[in-house]
Image: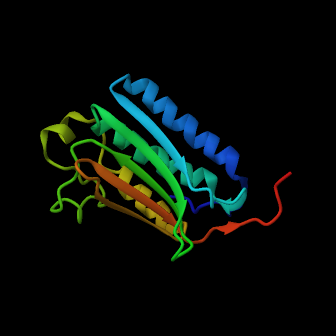
Amino acid sequence: MSLPSPPTEVRASLAIAEFRSELSGFQARAGNNISTKLTVDPAIPQSMCIDLERVSQILTNLLDNAFKFTKSGQVSMHIRIDKDTDGLIFDICDTGPGISKRHEPELFKRLYQIDNGVARRAEGSGLGLSISKEVATLLSGTLSVRPNSPKGSIFTLTLYDWRQVDAEIA
């Protein structure tokens, strides 16, 4: 795996438009049984330094999984800043079958796949989450999962090594 690119200045509105387009593209392929939602914290700065290519790689994988395992309901993305840690947070939430607590410790291991009917019907090699976690670590971030009540999952990408750019990008 190649190292991440150095963070570059990114206009938040352009990055958000890219994320919105990605979400819409997945929704169009999924059909009318799944709705989508994108929420953005007003505290997100107009410009920031991130490795947009690698962040997009992680988010695309998480969205792909969310749509793969959600047959009806909603897939959403929430972008926010954690006021305690100053982390830039991306939550991908779905209303799929969810992940049991007993599978969570193994979920980010290479080639791991949950052995249930839903996971077996979904195509994949079991590499996406492990690679995404490695990329998140290379970006000085974390990737985690927790239940989405009443059903589904929330995958959270948190970036700690990002910064607000004071001047607007031309």
Which residue lies most toward the front here? 42
Among the 4 quarters of the image, the one containing residue 70: top left
Up/down of 169 relative to 34, above or below: below
Among the 4 quarters of the image, the one containing residue 132: bottom left
Depth check: 103 or 31 in front?
Answer: 31
Residue 60 relative to residue 46: left or right: left
Among the 4 quarters of the image, the one containing residue 87: bottom right
Up/down of 110 relative to 94, above or below: below
Q: Please report the residue visible at 34 percent of the width from the left and 51 percent of the height from the top.
A: 127
Depth check: 111 or 118 in front?
Answer: 118
Up/down of 104 relative to 63, above or below: below
Q: Please report the residue visible at 61 percent of the width from the left and 40 percent of the height from the top.
A: 18
Residue 26 relative to residue 56: left or right: left
Residue 67 relative to residue 20: left or right: left
User: How many numbered dots are placed on residues in this image?
Assistant: 0
Q: How is the image coloured?
A: rainbow
Q: Please report the residue visible at 18 percent of the width from the left and 38 percent of the height from the top.
A: 118
Q: Please report the residue visible at 36 percent of the width from the left and 37 percent of the height from the top.
A: 74
Whole-percent x, y for residue 146 in the image: 29, 60
Which residue lies most toward the bottom here? 84
Depth check: 110 or 143 in front?
Answer: 143
Which residue lies most toward the right here? 170
Whole-percent x, y for residue 135 in the image: 49, 61
Up/down of 66 relative to 78, above or below: above
Whole-percent x, y for residue 137 in the image: 47, 68
